[in-house]
Image: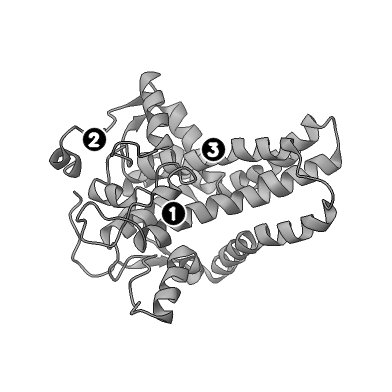
């Protein structure tokens, strides 16, 4: 079980003013875009249904980019749950970047800071810090879900991700985040256009549903770990914070919603450690291990005490 840091909250690396404005603008666009797209698309598609092609493209990209976050950004880069061969490392970094949740190194630094100060002062997105019930609790949930993104601050990578800063591949890939974000929206448009035989309308609908809406859904699935999985659900392990397991979110979060179990054993490659606890991210890691692409995988062992000590 990860030891708690009882020191004061760390210093924060602030972005230049223009960067803070740009980041807040992009964040606001991706929060507001999916519902606006649905509202605009309804009259355009009235009397018709969304094409199966859009759903297939969206589902494939949801799985690829979502597992890029869960297997790549989270379990590999943030917690070193396994060691990846260089090609797999690069692919996971690119796939996670295409979820459009920020640069790899910034994401990892913020997440590691969350673990150090989980649900205490210094946690960047706890729903409990400063919440005292009533509307305050509602504000806490809002802050944990996506309000924290507008704070314009980022955990210092030099403190929380020095190992990633020493990896030239990851530094370069982090700097290329804007390129991967554009590609994440451009690929559905191109796929829709190609699969339809060159229809611009098909490319546009794929861009809307498999691009903008798909990114929005991934965002809310990820943010639900910060908000829902620190407020509702079960707490089978005493982790010293308010992290919970929420079975209903296991599929859409690819196993990340077994969050209390994760906080009990942060470096463990499998979060769904109980019988019947779905964890597609762990299964994917297992496939990588069988292929020889992932080594030194930190799997849970049979007895509970050893799992919690992992």
Residue wearing tag 1: 106
> Residue 208: x, y in percent?
72, 49
Q: From the viewer's side, name the closer residue of 27 and 243.
A: 243
Q: From the viewer's side, name the closer residue of 136 and 108.
A: 136
Q: Secondary structure at mark 3?
A: helix
Measure the C-alpha gap from mark 2 to mark 3: 24 Å
Drawn side of residue 210 relative to residue 48, left or right: left
Q: Quadrant of the C terminus?
A: top left
Earlier in the chain: of badge 2 and badge 1, it is 1
Earlier in the chain: of badge 2 and badge 3, it is 3
Residue wearing tag 3: 63
Q: Name the residue rendered at 18%, 32% in the picture.
A: 302
Q: Secondary structure at mark 2?
A: loop
Residue 293's image quarter? top left
Count of numbered marks: 3
- Residue 210 image label: none
Residue wearing tag 2: 300
Residue 172 seen by the camera = no
Residue 229 seen by the camera = yes
Q: Name the residue rendered at 26%, 34% in the picture.
A: 298
Measure the C-alpha gap from mark 1 to mark 3: 22 Å
Q: Secondary structure at mark 1?
A: helix
Drawn side of residue 225 relative to residue 34, left or right: left
Q: Name the residue rendered at 47%, 36% in the picture.
A: 92
> Residue 38: x, y in percent?
72, 57
Q: Say above or below: 189 vs 222.
A: above
Earlier in the chain: of badge 1 and badge 3, it is 3
Q: Residues within 10 Å of mark 3 (few under 14, many from 20)?
A: some
Q: From the viewer's side, name the closer residue of 91 and 276.
A: 276
Q: Residues within 10 Å of mark 1 (few under 14, many from 20)?
A: some
């Amino acid at each position: 079980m990860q030891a708690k840091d009882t020191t004061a909250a760390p210093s924060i690396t602030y972005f230049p003013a223009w960067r803070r404005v740009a980041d807040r603008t992009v964040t606001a666009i991706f929060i507001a875009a999916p519902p606006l797209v649905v509202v605009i698309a309804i009259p355009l598609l009235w009397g018709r249904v969304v094409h199966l092609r859009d759903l297939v493209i969206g589902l494939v990209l949801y799985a690829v980019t979502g597992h890029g976050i869960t297997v790549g950004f989270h379990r590999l880069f943030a917690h070193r749950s396994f060691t990846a061969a260089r090609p797999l490392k690069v692919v996971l970094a690119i796939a996670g970047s295409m979820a459009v949740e920020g640069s790899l190194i910034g994401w990892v630094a913020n997440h590691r800071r969350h673990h150090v100060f989980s649900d205490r002062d210094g946690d960047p997105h706890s729903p409990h810090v400063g919440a005292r019930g009533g509307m305050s609790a509602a504000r806490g949930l809002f802050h944990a879900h996506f309000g924290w993104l507008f704070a314009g601050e980022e955990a210092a990578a030099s403190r929380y991700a020095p190992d990633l800063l020493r990896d030239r591949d990851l530094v370069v890939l982090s700097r290329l985040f804007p390129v991967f974000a554009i590609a994440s929206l451009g690929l559905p448009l191109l796929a829709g256009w190609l699969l339809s035989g060159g229809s611009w309308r098909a490319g546009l609908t794929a861009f809307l549903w498999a691009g903008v809406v798909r990114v929005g859904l991934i965002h809310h699935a990820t943010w639900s770990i910060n908000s829902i999985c620190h407020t509702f659900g079960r707490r089978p392990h005493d982790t010293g914070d308010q992290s919970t397991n929420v079975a209903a979110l296991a599929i859409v979060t690819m196993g990340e919603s077994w969050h209390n179990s994760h906080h009990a054993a942060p470096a463990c490659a499998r979060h769904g450690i109980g019988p019947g606890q779905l964890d597609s991210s762990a299964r994917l890691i297992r496939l990588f291990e069988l292929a020889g692409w992932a080594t030194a995988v930190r799997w849970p062992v049979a007895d509970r005490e050893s799992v919690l000590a992992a």
